Amino acid sequence: MPVIKCAVYVRKSTEHGLEQEFNSLLNQDESCKAYIASQAFNNWEYVRTYTDAAISGGTMERPALKQMLDDISKGLINTVVVYKVDRLSRSILDFHNMMKYFDKYGCNFVSITQAFDTSTSMGKLTLNMLLSFAQFEREVASERVRDKIRASKAKGLWMGGNPPLGYDIKDKKLVVNEAEAQQVKQLFEKYLELQSVKRLVQYAEAQGIYSKKWISKKGNQKGGNKISLMGMHRLLRDMTYIGQIAHKKANTFAKGEQDAIISKELFNEVQQALKNNSNNKTESHRSPNLLSGKLFNSQGERFINQVKTNKNHTKIHYYAQKGLFIPAAPVDEVVSNTLSEFLNADLSYLPPDSASALKSVNWAALSGVQKRDFIQAIVDKAIFSNKQLIIYLDISPNSVRPFITDVYVNQSSLPMEFITNEYSVTITVPVVFRRYANTKFSKAKTSLLTITENNNLIVKAFATAWRYREMYEKCGDVDTIARNEHIALRHVYKHLSLVYLNPEVVNHILSNQCQISVRDMLDKASRSNDFAEQKKLFAAHL
């Protein structure tokens, strides 16, 4: 009788309870091992345990699961043993795909607490029913929480979160803090006098009025910082101060249990003043952004400037459509570097007077303000898309002349690709756009990279993925990798998914035939184990 090589798969959705000496994972493991031992007369033999801790069963992005599937394809495992069906997956689609994968390599599946035989039609029906209820339970729980929040807010109940300035939390209710309430009234009344949120922020700091300070449940002190510009906007629009509770997603309001701090009349006056000041806003200073008013998206929509203030720093973005904010700094950096390269390029194809003027601009000697003025003078417009930034230049001598340095001639004549038509030049810069750019490899970078910068990050990501796999095969524990590397578990999971990426897709990425950001690459790699489906996911980037 051949040996049946058995693997145990255990999983827990959250970290809660994992610190206990005997936790859920150990219970699952011991129970499954005992079941395998009871089947010794059938020649069952335990091989190893695959553990995914603190990760949902609704996703396939589980390194231990992927390692197990890989071992099944190599013939190292004949049977997978779990404590319950939902430990393997809570998604019907994912489970069906795994059952097909098991059948392909002749691997059986056993749940020790839910007896069924997948070799019969009734066993398959039972399995699908159990899985359907597992998914139903997960979705109903989510709906129940959302409904509870919606109903509670409709009754005016405080549903938690950071307490607003002017209130304390007692017995899960908002109670007026008299000292802070006076500060809130002072800010509302002062705004009607100043008619400027920015000046009100300065006034609050001068008066020693700071954001709400409180102690969290864990005993940590929160808040007590300078009120930011956006924080002041939120404070002036917060209906909590007139005794209302808002449900933002449903866009509804209800009378709250808390006492009002200011009158509705004062609140309405402030809202009207905010609206009027917003409509009548004028540009009182020159924007520091290089492409202010000159940057468009591929649909022809103009980007405008957006300012976000967070604690002690301010971020400036370009904004054209809902959900798309491009940090201004990386865009301006690409434009600045491109113009510097252009001045050092072979300009013999340009009109002689323009070429002579451009070669008389000493870029290195220009101050930051002068470089900004030069770029804004000769950049006619720019068009941004996810894969390129097209810059249109006006190189007429009149545009360049104010920046000419006497007795200076740039002797550089480096190759550079651009299109010229009389006094107009078009330069196309291939770029990769990342909506969220804080990665392990480029914390100093933001959301726009040149192709060369992005390719370097991709190579580092693949190298890290294979290094993590070697570490995982040695220790068999993702937590150990995370601790040793001083990173979060999700970073380990995401990089391990690259190891199972379709080799054809990998070749396209590393040969620069597929232009994709590191984040998008990691996200797409983690969505499927099926090679054909992976090729479809990456098709848009090929």
Image (spheres, rainbow, N blue to C red):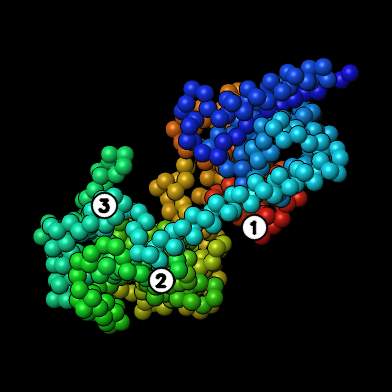
Q: Residue at x 50, y 72 (%)?
A: 297
Per the rendering, the mark at residue 252 is: 2
Per the rendering, the mark at residue 18 is: none
Residue marked by disc 3: 169
Horizontal side of residue 208 vs 475, given as left or right: left
Image: 286 above or below 12: below
Mark sitting earlier along the chain (2/1): 2
Q: Residue at x 84, y 43 (%)?
A: 122
Tell whether label 2 touches label 3 (CB within 8 Å). Answer: no
Horizontal side of residue 517 vs 275, given as left or right: right
Horizontal side of residue 146 vs 264, given as left or right: right
The amino acid pointed to by label 2 is Thr
Q: Residue at x 68, y 25 (%)?
A: 32
Mark 3: few, some, or many residues within 10 Å (few <14, many ≥20)? Answer: some
Image quadrant assignment for residue 292:
bottom left
Horizontal side of residue 30 vs 75, given as left or right: left
Mark 2: few, some, or many residues within 10 Å (few <14, many ≥20)? Answer: few
Q: State how far apart marks 3 and 1 are (Cα).
A: 51 Å
Q: Residue at x 52, y 62 (%)?
A: 429
The amino acid pointed to by label 1 is His
The amino acid pointed to by label 3 is Ile
- Helix, strand or loop at disc 1? helix
Residue marked by disc 1: 541
Asked whether 473 or 256 is in front, the reply is 256
Image quadrant assignment for residue 99:
top right
Query: Could one spot residue 4 in this view of the protein?
Result: yes
Image: 92 above or below 197: above
Q: Position of residue 372 (x, y in %)?
A: 33, 66
Mark sitting earlier along the chain (3/2): 3
Q: Nearer the viewer, mark 2 or mark 1?
A: 2
